[in-house]
Image: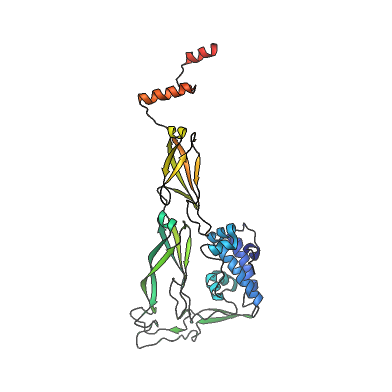
Amino acid sequence: MSKRDYYEVLEVARDADAAELKKAYRKLAMQFHPDRNPDDDVAEARFKEASEAYEVLSNPEKRALYDRFGHEGLRNGAGGGQGFSSMDDIFSQFGDIFGDIFGFGGRGGGARQSNGPQRGADMRYDLELTFEEAVFGVSRTIVIPQRHDCKTCEGSGAKPGTEPSTCQSCMGRGQIHHSQGFFTLSSTCPNCRGAGTQIDEKCTDCHGQGTIQAEKEVTVKVPAGVDTGTRLRLRSEGQNGTRGGPSGDLYVFLYVQPSEVFERDGADIHFPLQVHFAQAALGCELEVPTLGEPQTIQIKPGTQYGDRITLKNEGIARLNGSGRGDLIVHISIEIPKKLSTEQRELLEKFADLSELSYKKAGFFDKLKEKIS
């Protein structure tokens, strides 16, 4: 079964801005949320469909791919539009939206116990690339800060030989319940911060945190054709989860240095070529640089300033897999500032043969021409 148009799913116009997209998604999420529609497979499918549409359209890079190539562009591109692996994946990615809707956490009908497994936080890393690395792709190893379970206390946070005790404020639930009329609201216990336990004697190595700061090497495989603003998602390479929870994701934002030779415009590259005016008039063959080996191009007789020569498929690989861009050579005419005596005589003879006026006429010369 083919996927519906994402704009149709969210019921928004194709030029909807970020605020309109979020408002539309909030409305659908509230309507089809699983906790409001228990055991309703249709509502769950609509909820996942809306979440997938919002995940793509709220990301400028993915939205641009989708607007240009549709669902096929996302399948062949840098990711996205493939759906979520689980409901928890949706709740973790759009937790701020669900928090606005329900007032707490991602699931309604009672907050999830925070003393259970917790997903690690997502992380961001800004990676700078050379023009060549972005064009051809590269594998880079980066170092990110990472927290690991303390080996001394085995992650408990308590001094070896002791154990955490039950929090007396929430009696181990990790949540404090507040009744307001017909409603019961839950909030994280301020004493144990949702852990359900409290540490009376802290581990001296991790100071009761249960984790210690370390560094982690991560290999980032950058595909060919990326540009400034491209975002790569490395699943499970973010902060470690706690209490057996999954790790967060690592988002790598790319910044590409400009080329010293070419000017980039998407997948196309531009190269300015200076041609001597005699070469432009007579025609010639000249060598130009490319992303690979230099190529010889034909300058036709009578070439003018501003003419362009396009070398097809000599540009940058497109991320969506639809071939390469072009190399566009821009012609500018080089006119010598100084001439030798012989060069000047030859040019004057050329001007005479072409009946060109090149000698400076004085006021009386021009007056004579008018009278005669």
Looking at the image, what colour scheme do you see? Answer: rainbow
Residue positioned 38% across, 65% down in the render: 142
Left or right of residue 249: residue 67: right
**Could you say where residue 364 lies in the image, as x and y percent from the top left?**
48, 13
Residue positioned 54% across, 75% down in the render: 88
Judge whether 244 appears above or below 271 on screen.
below
Q: Quadrant of the C terminus?
A: top right
- Pick whichever, 12 or 128, lies toward us: 128
Q: Quadrant of the N terminus?
A: bottom right
**Could you say where residue 343 lies in the image, as x and y percent from the top left?**
38, 26
- Pick whichever, 143 or 77, lies toward us: 77
**Could you say where residue 97 lies in the image, as x and y percent from the top left?**
57, 69
Judge whether 135 appears above or below 95 on screen.
above
**Could you say where residue 301 lies in the image, as x and y percent from the top left?**
48, 34
Q: What is the total number of numbered labels drawn onto the structure image?
A: 0
Q: Is residue 252 visible?
A: yes
- Pick whichever, 297 or 73, lies toward us: 297
Q: Is residue 334 visible?
A: no
The image quadrant that residue 83 belongs to is bottom right
Judge whether 346 appears above or below 113 on screen.
above
Residue positioned 45% across, 59% down in the render: 224
Left or right of residue 360: residue 322: right
Judge whether 340 appears above or below 34 on screen.
above
- Pick whichever, 232 or 351, lies toward us: 351
The image quadrant that residue 130 belongs to is bottom left
